[in-house]
């Protein structure tokens, strides 16, 4: 990365990108070296992404499924899904759909929506698992 200055940065500009080597890009376009600011930016970005990944979305179905599918893969790992037989996916889907049914019957709308989305996310991950087996 081309650095505009070879001195430690003390610019008040906002960091819009950072790299592990300490290089930062500021909102005014300046690229400089500021390891402390780079580390703070990267830690804040990790925290933001973890919050997003671990925050269920229940109102936007497609966004919710994408977030939940990524959450499931992060939580359980690809090795966990790779060992599943088709009947394992079937029973997991039935279990989650049953949780959605139970929540809906007792009037817990948010839980019902979450379990509907988590069921769809299981289907997305089953799909990924099947594709990876076909292309392997």
Image (tube, helix red, strand yellow):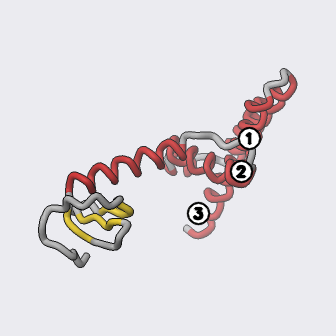
Q: Where is residue 127 in the image (x, y as percent from the top left)?
A: 68, 58
Q: What residue does disc 1 label?
A: 93
Quarter-of-image position of residue 31: bottom left
Q: Residues within 10 Å of mark 1 (few under 14, many from 20)?
A: many
Q: In this view, does 56 lie to the left or right of 23?
A: right
Q: Tags 1 and 2 in contact by the CB under 8 Å rule? A: yes
Q: Where is mark 3, residue-wise? A: 132
Locate residue 118: give its quadrant. top right
| Helix, strand or loop at mark 1 | helix
How far is the residue under mark 1 from the one under mark 2?
A: 8 Å
Q: Residues within 10 Å of mark 3 (few under 14, many from 20)?
A: few
Identify the residue shown where x is 21% and y is 76%. Answer: 4
Residue 62 in the image: state x and y as whole percent: 72, 54
Q: Mark 2 points at which residue?
A: 123
User: Residue 100: in sight, yes or no?
Assistant: yes
Contact? badges 3 and 1 (CB < 8 Å): no
């Amino acid at each position: 990365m081309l650095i505009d200055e070879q001195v430690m940065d003390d610019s008040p500009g906002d960091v819009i990108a950072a790299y592990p080597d300490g290089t930062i890009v500021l909102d005014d376009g300046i690229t400089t070296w500021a390891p402390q600011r780079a580390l703070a930016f990267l830690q804040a970005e990790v925290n933001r992404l973890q919050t997003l990944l671990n925050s269920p979305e229940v109102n936007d179905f497609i966004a919710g499924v994408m977030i939940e599918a990524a959450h499931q893969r992060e939580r359980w790992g690809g090795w966990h899904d790779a060992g599943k037989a088709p009947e394992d996916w079937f029973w997991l889907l039935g279990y989650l759909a049953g949780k959605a049914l139970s929540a809906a019957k007792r009037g817990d709308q948010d839980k019902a929506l979450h379990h509907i989305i988590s069921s769809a996310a299981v289907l997305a991950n089953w799909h990924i698992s099947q594709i990876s087996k076909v292309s392997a």
